[in-house]
Image (tube, helix red, strand yellow):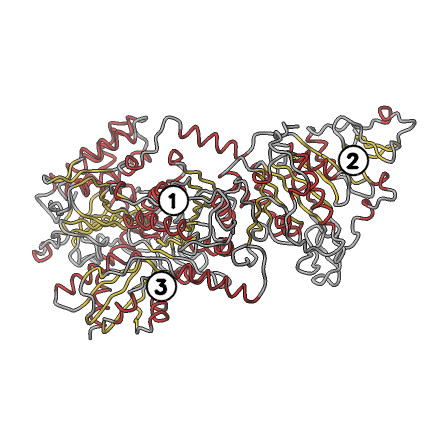
Amino acid sequence: MATAVVDEADKRQSPLSDAVVVRFAGDSGDGMQLTGGQFTLSSALAGNDFATFPDFPAEIRAPQGTLFGVSAFQINFGSSAIDTAGDAPDVLVAMNPAALKTNVPSLKPGGLIIADEGEFNDRNLAKAKYDANPLDDGSLAKWQLLKLNISQLTMDAVKPFGLGNKEALRCKNMWTLGLALWMFDRDRQPLIDWLNGKFAKAPDLAAANIAALNAGHAYGETAELAGPLKQHHVDPAPVAPGLYRTLTGAEGIALGLVAGAQLAKLPMFFGGYPITPASAILHHLSRLKEYDVTTFQAEDEIAAICSAIGASYGGALGVTSSSGPGIALKGEAMGLAIMTELPLVIVNSQRGGPSTGLPTKTEQSDLYQAVYGRNGDAPMPVISARSPGDAFDCAIEAVRIAVQYMTPVMLLTDGYIANAAEPWAVPDLTTYEAFPVEFLTEVPEGGFKPYGRDDKLARPWVKPGTPGLLHRIGGIEKEVDTGHINYAPGNHQAMTDIRKDKIDGIKVPDQIVELGAEGGKLAVVGWGSTFGPIHQAVRRKRAEGLDVSHVHIRHIWPLPANLGELLKSFDRVIVPEMNTGQLKTVLRDQYLVDAKPVNKVSGQPFTIAEIEAAIEEALK
Amino acid sequence: MNQVTPITRATTLKDWETDQEVRWCPGCGDYAILKAVQRTMPEIGTAPENTVFISGIGCSSRFPYYMETYGFHTIHGRAPAFATGLKLANPNLDIWIVTGDGDGLSIGGNHTMHLIRRNLDCQIMLFNNEIYGLTKGQYSPTSRVGTTSPSTPYGSVDRPAQPAAFALGAGARFVARGFDVSKELPNVLKAAHAHKGAAFIEIFQNCIVYNKDVFEDFAAPKGAEDRQLWLKHGEPMLYAKGTKGIALDADELHLKTVDVVDGDWEAAGVIVHDVTNRSVAHMLVEMRFGEFPMALGVLYDDPRPTFEADVWRQNAAAREGKTADLQGLLKKGQTWTVTEGGPEL
């Protein structure tokens, strides 16, 4: 059934090399995220480095076959370091016309399309707004096309198991995965084990899915002789020996928060409210009760943060999490946590905005909101994670600052980091330094001052229930030391200064240069999830001999003490970010450097090529 | 209806007063409520250090500053959410929420509803003065139709919320009413504290500046016995010195007032108050003053398991037999080992 419609020899020069980008695209009901996830595991077991990009619609069950109902999963895997999910796919698996239409424009010229022609019927073509069948009209000539009736092949493969039509067709994704496993010379056994585990209670379904997987694999073997289908082996990437796992950003945050609470020797209280793409953190933590974690699904975003502050007041580590719209609702309560100087971690999984915006798409447009977005002079530390693995360490860092400085801390991540998976070398927790909290339990020498300060300018943390230290706190301006209500002009000036000095004085590590030299012609300064494309683009341009360096900022507020000097040591500074120039503005304001913006606000991450182009432009 | 918390240490009224100057308007009903609470605390017998007063924003919400306990003056309408986090973090604390009609029913109505629904163990004192005091006199969600105020110069047109009915509708297991200068208020507070769970107390409070004497029609000492029905568990619902009572109109299924002749309330069909009768409670909170006396005291009291107890029980069950091996947790899921020879499962 495979038909090689494009047969010119030049197109047979496979673009596949030591790194391959595959995109699985289908209807949201086709199980593409699951297929992608399992293919990711298989890549890990093959020893490849990889990065993934799940891209799915906001609609839970979008009407079948529609353009807006397309769900895609992209993976970039290779035998050398992989920093991004890849710019343009080498292989596109399109399970229906809508998936082809929305995804084929980004496919590399000469790339391979594998399309399920069984789904290219008049009805689905109409839904995808195709006038003619693209599989037949030559419109895909610049790519290699392999059209298979995956639907029929799957039905044939699972026939012996007596499934209904609908259930049988659900095995399509396993057939496709089987073919993909063959294409990249992968072992099927881990998948078979996984299917047996997943369908332990329904052995028929397990057997049918395994049969589909095997049939897809066998199809590859037998069809190899003709057509564009070629088996391609990607060697393992040289990685340090050790134990690895796949980690998503949401897992990284959840595990990092648990680790942080343990290092602080505190129980954790997590107050959350369902919101995309932050809910996964609540889901993960709600299963970790044995780590002294209490989770609370509040009635709204405001109650979520207020309950977390209440728990912090009671001596727990209060944590709340949301995305932009929910963070906006939490603003007033953040001000109270600043005023009452209680520790709190606020996680913002950024998404496209403003308002409801693009709930399932990624963006970095909440930096102003994080740094400045509260009433009054309300300084608050802000940390941003660059990757799922980095999110683990950032969460620990957020907890450390919160408890040592008695302050709320904002931890920024984004939809891309939250959902994407990467291989992660499981860290040895004994290498992390503990920072156990000491509550004040007795009247200190000189008397008890609820707003007295230590060398970090942090006030004492007293748990209600402690005899002899009774006191009242609240959102009205506090008197220096005593914490009584005080509206006096001099006192407000003094307290405003103290709150600012405390945050400014937080010790954060000096800024390092990720790649390149300290000083030179051009610095590309990034933050958060743009790390991958910036790093790869700088690496490539340096390989071409250009004088360019990569600086990636974790501590957004306060900024590292040496950052101003470092930026001034470069002739030019560009700041790629997925917003209209927010970090750029902060850097200009703080250091009077002529930082130039490179912006992308499309809900999609930067491609490496886009950053490369920006570097070339800046060095003109 | 519950066990009273055992006395830990004898205290006096003075032990519950702070050194802070009280800043309510002279003559404000809040003074009387503050005194009633400070007078009641020694009788309740909990320790000041285990007691936390949590408030939102408004005149009533200054309350924590005047109680020599732990106190948290939070943000507008959100006191129930802070209380929930605190109680979940430390269920041993005795938590009192102080709120008002604007704070607890307007901006914070959502949180009040959910706190009651969840049945967090705490006392909620809602000071109802039918006006916004601290913002200088705008009408509130409990103001009567036609209330003129700076924001409603032609009179308010929206219908008021009924706090006790709201609480019961939200699933409250304890609903009581009192008023600022009433001698019975301490008994109401004690009953609320004795109830394990969310205890909702509507306290009518006289705002002498912006809504003076709005409750005088039933709270005035003169003729009070004709206009106040003080409910007592196990006793007939009698008022007007026993000459009137509350009975059920069995045909129409609503309450009615009846005359009691020669003290024979049974013959008049007067209902004996059973604080655990939820159906009667629904009728009591809906009883309109004027046609009826104002129902005061404990209207309903029938405890059930509390939220924090259930959360702690579930947490304990989920932790049963598990150790907090974080290093082990990090290794869970899809893992592989890379050795010199390459990766393996």
Query: Residue A587, relative to residue B201: is it above or below?
Result: below
Q: Residue at x 44, y 40 (%)?
A: A295
Please say if B184 is above or below A325: above
Q: Residue at label 3?
A: A579
Q: Which mark is residue A281?
A: 1
Query: Would residue A232 be seen by someone viewing this image from the given angle?
Result: no
Q: Counting other residues with Cα less than 10 Å from the Cα at mark 2, is it few (<14), some (14-19), or many (20 or more)?
A: some
B218 displayed left or right of A573: right
C-alpha separation, residue under disc 2 versus residue under disc 1: 51 Å
Q: Residue at x 15, y 64 (%)?
A: A542
- Say if mark 2 contacts mark 1, CB within 8 Å: no
Image location of residue A359, percent across then percent down: 40, 53
Task: Give the chain letter at badge 1.
Answer: A
- Can you tell which of label 3 and label 2 is closer to the viewer? 2
Q: Earlier in the sequence, mark 1 or mark 3?
A: 1
Q: Amino acid at mark 2?
A: Trp
The residue most toward the right is: B262
Q: Quadrant of residue A437?
A: top left
Seen in the picture, residue A456 relative to A2 is either above or below; the reply is below
Say what amino acid the circle numbered 1 marks.
Ile
Q: Chain of mark 3?
A: A
Task: Name the element at disc 2.
Answer: strand
Which quadrant of the figure contains the C terminus of chain B? top left
**Secondary structure category for the residue under label 3:** loop
Counting from the top left corner in percent of width and height, residue B74 is at 56, 51
